[in-house]
Amino acid sequence: MGRIRLVLMFMVIGGAITLNAQSQPPKNILLICVDDLRPELASFGAPYIHSPNMDKLAAQGRAFPHHYVNAPSCGPSRYTLLTGVYGPSDNNALFFRADEILKDAKSVTPSMPEWFRKNGYTTVSVGKVSHHPGGLGGPDWDDPHEIEMPNAWDRRLMPVGEWQHPRGAMHGLAHGEIRQGRGTMEVYQSAPGPDTIYPDGLIVSEALNQLDILTADKSKPFFLAVGILKPHLPFGAPKNYLEFYKDIELPAILHPEKPQGISTWHDSGEFMQYNRWGKDPRNDDDFATDVRRHYAACVSYADAQVGRILKKLRETGADKNTIIVLWGDHGWNLGEHNIWGKHNLFEEALRSPLIVSYPGIEHPGENAEGMVETVDIFPTLCDLTEVNVPNFLIGTSFLPILDDPKAKGQPAVGYYNKAKTIRTPDYRLIFHDSGEIELYDENVADKEVVNIADSNPEIVLELKAELDRRLKSKHK
């Protein structure tokens, strides 16, 4: 009789465990994309930056100080994030993919939001998630017949307010000012007023509205992607954010000299097209400091928008079952290597913040030691949500690093125009289509200044072979 009771007890316990496992709802995903955000955050080693919301997210989750994007420009970087494969280095990379879908949909692998949509998720995009805010083409980026990511989103939204259209919001300043032509818009600005006088205030307000809608529907998990525009050029943010930097002394710009010999240096054309009042930060230290302060103000403004999103997530109660990913689409040179902008293969343009947080994460607040790249995010989210990992992905899930911050990562590759690169913990190799090579020792104080390729042919051959092997995995 006792044995029967024991068997029945185990059957009841086992049934309860099974029922509990089956009753656990699927995890939601909140993806926050921040445009042109280099690792200029207190939690990433920049204590002079006021970024309390992103820092709090890092403290409760896992920051990845060694995260590298696959291309130093908005369009191709977002391509790798949203598709899980390498692609073109052009800003229209996702539109090229859309053209391929129109020709032969079966030849193009599903995007990340499309994959989660196929697996029962409601997918919503607000703001700049793909390259065009709102995900549409046409002269003003609002043509419903030109879709940047077909089949990806149940809803794609881009509130424009005074900015008239998404293109205006992308390149606008306060109160709806739209960039009309080269040199007509100020390169930085700090207008007095609330957060909503700049486009991100409206983007995030719509994101909060979508959180209310998504969390009210208990029948399906959600994949909500929110794209914040700042600190993208021009560097404009409400005046109160500039006040954080009024009296602080910024650290010196590292290796500000123009590189000698072959490199991916450029003349900062995107920055120089704005009205700079006749000044050039490359030879005017006071102006360079002013630019850096306004960039920092934009970072703090973006951080406040992140805070609004996370606060709403907590208010809905969905934070208890949501994976949060905060991702910068690439870095930005603030004078390093004599560059003011992105579009190069130096460390400053390829390294960007990545933070992942979810309830129950192991060792919260401990930074990841391993190296990861943007293309790894798609398979990682599949692992975290227990959604099947598609076999076409070329990235590697970094779930082991989320479980153990000391776990190893892998080298990161990148590409832009006529050059490609691989970054290991010790070296960066940049290989140009012309055959010319850069190799830098990442363990020296003045990184990526002295090209040591000629004196290290064995290292060059080894890294070039690994780079070629990795990029052979390139898909459309």
Image (spheres, rainbow, N blue to C red):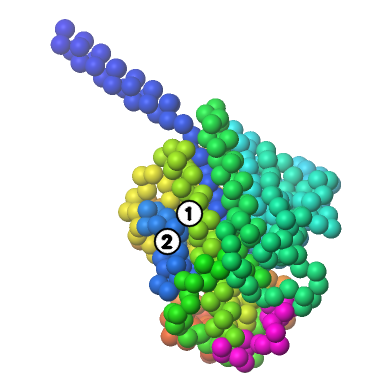
Q: Which residue is drawn at 40% across and 72% down?
A: 47
Q: How many marks?
A: 2
Q: Which of 117 and 4 is in front in this view?
A: 117
- Name the mark on residue 375: none
Q: In this view, does 99 lie to the left or right of 242?
A: right
User: What residue is pinned by disc 1?
Assistant: 307
Please name the amino acid that badge 2 sits on.
Pro
Q: Identify the residue under disc 2.
A: 52
Extreme-front residue of the structure: 192
The residue at 50%/85% (across/down) is 254
Residue range of the region highlighted in magenta in the rendering:
268-286
Asked whether 411 or 37 is in front, the reply is 37
| Label 2 residue SS | helix
Where residue 100 appears, x then y in whole percent?
A: 80, 50
Q: Residue at x 34, y 50 (%)?
A: 362
- Residue 43 appears in the rendering: yes
| Magenta-drawn stretch, dominant element (helix, strand or loop) | loop
Q: Position of residue 142 (x, y in %)?
A: 79, 51
- In the displayed structure, 449 sits above or below 346; it is below
Q: Where is residue 192 in the image (x, y as percent from the top left)?
A: 59, 66
Is 88 positioned to the left or the right of 103 in the image? Answer: left
